[in-house]
Amino acid sequence: MTNTDQGKNLPKDADEHIARLRSQITHNTECGTTHYNLAVALLGKQEYVEAEKVLHDAIDCSPTLAEAYVLLGGICLQRKDLEGCYRYNQRATKARAGFAEGYANMAFVLLQLVDGKDSKEDEEKVDKAIKNLKKAIIHNKHFVQAYATLGTAYFMKGLVPEGIKANLEALNVQPEFPIAHNNLAVAYLETGEFDKAIVHCDKAEELGFEVARELKDELAPHRKA
């Protein structure tokens, strides 16, 4: 999911910030943005039940507030309710045409729902995820996470060259995006391009990504002394 920075930019005194927002709401109960900001602050304190209620208030005031639907989806994800997360992100894309984050989050959920049994249902989920990720990228060509997730979806279909291309696009947007480097290390190992795999493996680790021990062990014999 892409809404990982909830509450990150709160003032030092979060309680004071929350109290100030509550006061603003009492003077203007119809402001969806203030309700939304209060919900973000509550999420920063992990007060999920209250935040959920406030987000519904925000939507009641501002039905097109797509970000509120995304946060409700994030709360569902925290509860491991993937279907609920999908529904809220779907509503986000309906609330605001071209809302890239909603499409990317729907794709993320679809990939999580793949059970790995190579069934027709799994194939349909991956195909739908790819479609949603392409929409996300059309609406936001700098959406680095969408490119990386698209690469993962292609890998799940066995389309390694397409997956490599998508992750390289992610690095064009953000050269130091560790997930894309890790994905490329895995992909280049599979294609037998060991030098490239080692470069991306080492870069992912340098950027703080925890590379799987199995990947490092498979690359070890191909390192030059």
Image (cartoon, helix red, strand yellow):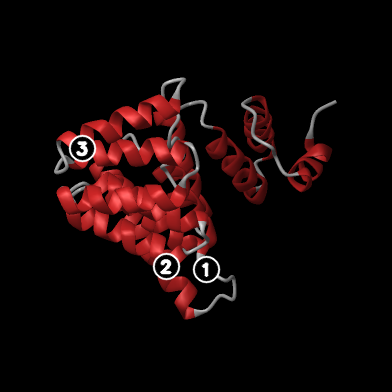
Q: Could you tell me which secondary element the residue under label 1 belongs to?
A: loop
> Foreground: 196 or 156?
156
Place of residue 48 in the rendered image (x, y in percent of width and height, measured from the top left): 45, 49
Q: Is mark 3 on a helix, strand or loop?
A: helix
Depicted 107 relative to depicted 213: above or below: below
Q: Name the residue under label 2.
A: 83
The residue beneath circle 3 is: 26
Which callout, 1 or 2, points to the residue nearer the camera?
2
Query: Quick check: can you spot residue 157?
Result: no
Horizontal and vertical percent for residue 214? 78, 48
- Which residue in the protein does label 1 denote? 114
Residue 212 horizontal/vertical position (percent): 73, 44
Circles 1 and 3: CB atoms closer than 8 Å: no
Task: Give the spatial CA distance, label 1 vs label 2.
Answer: 13 Å
Could you tell whether 169 is left or right of 78 in the image?
left
Q: Residue at x 67, y 46 (%)?
A: 189
Residue 10 at x, y percent in the picture: 41, 26
Quarter location, residue 173: top left
Disc 1 residue crowd, few under 14, some 14–19, many 20+, Cα 10 Å:
some
